[in-house]
Amino acid sequence: MTKQASAEDAGERTAERRCAWCRRALPERSGPGRPRRFCSQACRQWDWVARQRARELELADGELVVARTMLDELGDDLYALSCAIDDVDSDLADLDESKPRPSTEAAELRRILSWLLDTARPLATRSPPAITS
């Protein structure tokens, strides 16, 4: 075992493990054996079907087939998220500190919204990939 492999294994143990298909968190494993890759037999089956279909279509590991309607819905959702972020940014900027409100409540609300905005901004600036035919 190389130093790099052991470092990757150590990082994998500390990070939360997720299902290879649906990305749900996997339960901690305490016994012997291989670590689980899937949360259920259904996820294992869907992963197998997807790999078989990808092989038929000669897709590389990083390629994916997505329905146009799903891609359009993703674009719509990203636009709505971007608008929501702009609205919250504007509302936070206009927040009237003179209203009678406990300062700790306002500070906590500002902290929560700031965290939400910082988390959502990268998604809002992302756009769906161009469709090439």
Image (spheres, rainbow, N blue to C red):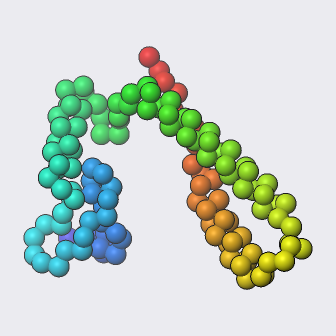
Residue found farthest to the left: 33
The residue shown at (78%, 57%) is: 91
Q: Is residue 3 visible?
A: no
x, y percent for residue 57: 24, 25
x, y percent for residue 40: 18, 56
The residue shown at (89%, 74%) is: 98
Total labels: the figure holds: 0
Q: Quadrant of the N terminus?
A: bottom left
x, y percent for residue 51: 20, 38
In front of the other: 27 or 59: 27
In front of the other: 91 or 127: 91
Classify residue 40 as left or right of residue 127: left
Classify residue 111 as left or right of residue 20: right
In the rendered view, would you say 29 is above or below 67?
A: below
In front of the other: 130 or 76: 76
Splitting the image into 4 quarters, where does residue 103 fall? bottom right
The residue shown at (73%, 83%) is: 104
In the rendered view, would you say 72 is above or below 6?
A: above
Classify residue 127 as left or right of residue 22: right
Q: Is residue 54 visible?
A: yes
The residue shown at (72%, 56%) is: 88
Residue found farthest to the top: 133
Residue found farthest to the right: 98
In the rendered view, would you say 38 is above or below 102?
A: above
x, y percent for residue 90: 79, 54
Splitting the image into 4 quarters, where does residue 83 fall? top right
In the rendered view, would you say 51 is above or below 44?
A: above
Q: Quadrant of the C terminus?
A: top left
